[in-house]
Amino acid sequence: MVNFSDLSFPEAPKIVTAIPGDKSGQIINQAMELDSSYVNYPRVLPIAFDEGKGATLRDVDGNIYIDFLAGISVMNFGYSNPVIMEYVNKQMRKLTHCLDFPTENKVTLLSKLNQIAPLQLKDNCKIFFPSPTGSEAVTAALRLAKLHTGRTTLLSFWGGYHGSNGEALAVSSWSGVYKCQHLPMLPDVHFLPFPYCYRCPFGMEHPSCNIQCLSFVKDALENGFSGFCKPAAMIMEVVQGEGGIHVPPKEFVQGLRKITEEKGIVLIFDEIQCGMGRTGKFWACEHYDTTPDIITSSKSIGGLGLPFAAMIYKKEFDDQHPGTSIGTFRGNALAMAGSLGALDFIDKYNLLAHVEKVSQVLNDGLKDLQKQYEVIGDVRHLGLMSAVEFVKDRKTKEPWPEFLDQYLVESMKRGLIQWKAGYYFNVARILPPLVVTEDMVNKALTIIEESIKVVLKNNRS
Ligand code: PMP
């Protein structure tokens, strides 16, 4: 039997040096000599990690952190999860790669994914393992929608992030990184406002808004002057991650399903960040009782951080010629074993119920902090996908991204790793491994409060 509190380093958090410690500093400097200028994370959080266990990480200087980043939702089942490692180790000794030839594991995994496919996709789906990143899963979904409908127009949403290759970047709303740097993007992609209720794009309040954002989408699809032709697909994250953890109202998601169904537009739910148990249900769309035509998964689906992606789609879309989509790394044997281990772990240890319980403690704690500190403009969450939005002024809601940057560093110095998100880069994104314990959450809440106090003090003086 696995006890969740035994999965992590028991002494976490434990900081024994300045951050970065000497060894971390040395390794970072060595890496920087040849590592690309694209590399980002260690420039903000200067740490060289050595070992991960459960919801904790140890660096090369012996500092131990509670990890509320989880590799951006890749490590949902914790580092070095013993149940999953057993599956992977067994596979490692037998066969590590065999293109997309079937294996016994593949057959078992296909059948299990069919069993857990959300709502009306169960027993009515086909499953494709594209190349192993989220971007590739999104690309596969968009291409399938285009091939199936014979149309090219794509609709996406403000705040949506879907990846960094050609197609996935084109439907991503984040205009930083490469997108506005004179690289041609896929044409015929259009963006619509997503419900960001704290800063409603229509200046309204939920629920008296009558879901204005939904009416807007409907009108854009019906009026003859919205500037786009009948779309092949509409893609959305059910809960937005990079955009700042936006949990849309139920009526919005259900309304989109109704509209897309009526108009024959393929509805794609990107559950790459919000799926795999993160929100307390296996798929976030289960909270909305809404079935998409295609669902994309990656990140945690490889179990131990092994690169893997999947696209689950309605059987009726399975009308393509073999070889229309090709690639070398599809359904890697090790990642499939990791995936089977993860599904076994979720089931055996009732992980979704655990998420429900722990997320309550975390989010109640964050809400309490919001009551005490004006700098927290908003706290929002679904399961263990949480956001703390920092503002200069509660009334004007002016974003305070510099506060967030300082807060991330102060938290790190005290042994808590988090990352940023949001339209204005002022949102602390909290994504703990799902095996995090209540005790660890309480320790993290203490660090969050201390860090807020210190940054406030530093900004006053
Ligand atoms: N979709 C979503 C919702 C994501 O969060 C991400 C990654 N942050 C991607 C797609 C892209 O995944 P990858 O970086 O593996 O290509």
Image: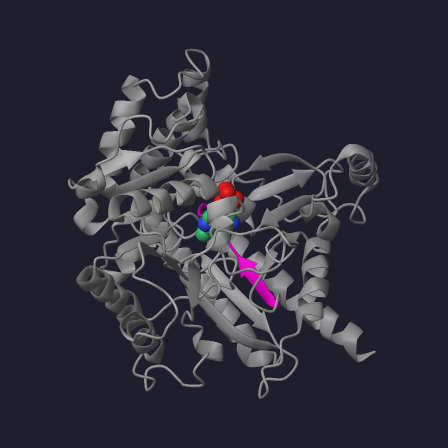
| Residue 236 rendering spot, x and y as whole percentages | 38, 58
Q: Is residue 276 visible?
A: no
Q: Is residue 308 visible?
A: yes
- Which part of the image, by quadrant, shows the C terminus? bottom right
Please tell me which residue lies in front, 96 or 166.
166
Magenta residues, start to end: 426-436
- Which part of the image, by quadrant, shows the N terminus? top left
Residue that appears at 82% across and 35% down? 33
| Residue 293 rendering spot, x and y as whole percentages | 25, 50
Quadrant for residue 9, please give it.
Answer: top right
Quadrant for residue 195, please give it.
Answer: bottom left
Please tell me which residue lies in front, 85 or 109.
109
Please tell me which residue lies in front, 325 or 353.
325
Query: In the figure, 30 relative to 292: above or below?
Result: above
The answer to whether 413 appears left or right of 9 in the picture is right
Residue that appears at 28% across and 73% down? 218
Query: In the figure, 372 relative to 418: above or below?
Result: below
- Asked whether residue 132 is drawn in magenta, I would say no
Query: In the figure, 81 relative to 424: above or below?
Result: above
Number of marks in picture = 0
Q: Main secondary structure of the magenta part?
A: loop
- Asked whether residue 429 is drawn in magenta, I would say yes
| Residue 55 rendering spot, x and y as whole percentages | 53, 44
The answer to whether 405 appears left or right of 444 in the picture is right
Please tell me which residue lies in front, 277 or 56.
277
Residue that appears at 70% across and 43% down? 39
